[in-house]
Image: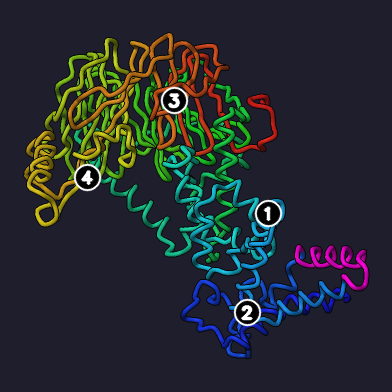
Amino acid sequence: MDSLDLQQVLTSSAAVALKEEGQFDVKAHPSTFKSIPSSIQGLGPQYCYRHRPDLVSQRLTDEEHIKGLETELETLPQDSQRVIDAIWSTFSTASERHRRIILDGILTKCCFSQLSFVSAAVKRLIRMDFVVVLPREISFQILQYLDAASLCRAAQVSRLWHQLADDDIVWHRMCEQHIDKKCSKCGWGLPLLQPHMLQSLKAPLGHPSDQDRQQSSYKLSSMLDADHRSVPPDEDSSPDCPPRKRRRFHGTSNVNTSYNPPQTRPWKVVYKERFTIGVNWKHGRYKTKVFEGHTDSIMCLQFDNTILATGSYDTTIRLWDVETATLLRTLRGHPSGVRALQFDDTKLLSGSLDHTIKIWNWRTGQCVRTIAGHDGSVISLHFVGNVVASGSSDKVIRVWDFDDKEMFTLRGHKDWVNAVKIDQMSRTLLSASDDFTLRLWDLNTHQCIRTFEGHCGQVQQVLFLPSELECDKHLESSRFVSAPKATEKTSATTNASLHSTRSSFGDGFSTHPDRVLPPRYMLSGGLDNTLRLWDTTSGECLRVFFGHVEGVWALAADRLRIVSGAGDSMTKVWDLATGACEKTFTGHTGPVTCIGLSDSMMCTGSDDCQARLFNFKTDIDEEPGKVE
């Protein structure tokens, strides 16, 4: 019997049995027949999974097994071959009921060794390719339970598996689980793609960017005219870059306004890029760029994908090209050291020891306006939208609200105000002071909501943590961002807890049930060498981070990590959930005074007059921290 005859006997057995026994009802056997292609449904006998003609031809293991049977059969005498062939033919032509009887009888006659052989063979034969059998939607659901490494291995099984395992549906789910948060299953988190990297894709959709930026700038400038202590525009700036470099700052006349279709990438490619950056963060693989040019301590910095801005005690603000580490422009105008700065697409605000805040058009280097409001040095500033806050050595916080066209003062600290941070959604403000305390303020009522005490040294930095973080899950049950439908869907106990939470933030929240509450968690760093995690609802210190041997001067955080810089010249990366120090970065020869953080980069400024940029978006095979 040749291989074709033997294969035909084996594959046609189910059809013969069905013919004698009667056709199977598909509805009665959905698990067996629901994967039958429509092309062969209703065209004669219906086959089980093992004998489907479209699958038998693809099952290489069965072909190899059949060839092995043929080889072994040919070694037997002709009489034995005819007997075995007759047994196979009889079984193949038997009905379903007769087959079961024959099998049952054979099994009762088997010895233990033969039963072991049957057991091993059955384990192999009853394996099923669920991707082929199940509907595509269910296959996607199953594949979504795999991790990234398992998905990559699954894609190597077959062409069909490769098609499903690489599908955007599966990898989009993978990105949802891991990007910008830590997965609850594996504990792995990947950095979020920064908004400025998507700007080039979003702008063409409505072409609003230039107009919106101009309106924002005009609104800011018009509000400044209302300040009776403002001084005329200052033209003192120094373009230290050649004309070729300066062109990138001048207006938008050369911008191509033609519409470009939004670019898209497969979710697997997005995950791979984010995964590479995440692994580099974890294992300390990065490239370093050093920015040198200041003649005194760098006290503040900020960077985006292309520009780094640094402010120094040498009275200047310097703008650098992130990619090449070259100086693009120097802003001169402050007669004393620059302690704080912040910029967006159109403007840069700087605070100085000369008691003033200056607003610059950083693209041209022009000082647009100077605000004089403090009686002491401006130590800190922060703006969100059209609200600007500044802290000073005069112990007060001044807030300029350009939307409401008002300026007001927040009083309460007993020493220098070293840091201010605005939360726009809740209209609250955090402040840190040399009086060892932190304060949470209501910008609507101009009142101090809560004072946080715990540091035993001057508090240098404070910031809100993202509302989505769950630092202590056992505290989450009593927390709600807003509850406009609470009276309809929650119990009386929950309503009471919600009212108590709102009341803890003062009348500005208890009398406005729709107002968004401040982020639950905040982080602070002080000269007692510690970082502290706080609950804004209760005022409780939840965790203390130990590791620095000198005072903490700089602080930055996102949803995946905390970064701190201290007087010990070290920069540390912390795990928010455990409080453990994950990595320590060195290189500076003086205290680290300021830090900037993005998804793939970290920048530090120091008393050694240098800024150092750590770029984690690099090839994974490079040696950790070796490239400069």
Residue 46 left/right relative to 141: right
Q: Is residue 573 left or right of residue 384?
A: right
**What quarter of the picture does the C terminus occupy?**
top right
Nearer the camera: disc 3 or disc 2: 2
Real-space CA distance between mark 4 and mark 3, rounded to the nearest whole angstrom: 26 Å
As measured in the structure, the alpha-carbon distance from the residue carrying label 3 to the one carrying label 2 is 60 Å
- Classify residue 152 as left or right of residue 59: left
What residue lies at 39% left-to-right and 29% top-to-bottom?
576
User: Hey, which quadrant is residue 263 in on the image?
Assistant: bottom right
SS for dot 1: helix
Q: Which residue is mark 1?
A: 120
Residue at 26%, 33% in the rendered image: 389
Point out the tag, 4 or 1, that comes first from the N-terminus.
1
Element type where label 4 sits in the image:
loop
Q: Is residue 39 visible?
A: no
Q: Amino acid at mark 2?
A: Tyr
Question: What's drawn in magenta, residue-wise?
Answer: 61-80
Q: Is residue 62 magenta?
A: yes
Q: Earlier in the sequence, mark 3 or mark 2?
A: 2
Q: If the image is split into quadrants, where does the N terminus sit? A: bottom right
Residue 481 numbered tag: 4
**Relative depth, front residue between 599 and 182:** 182
Q: CA distance from mark 1 to mark 3?
A: 52 Å
The label number, if any, that marks residue 574 in the structure image: 3
Task: Report which residue position mark 2 lands on.
Answer: 47
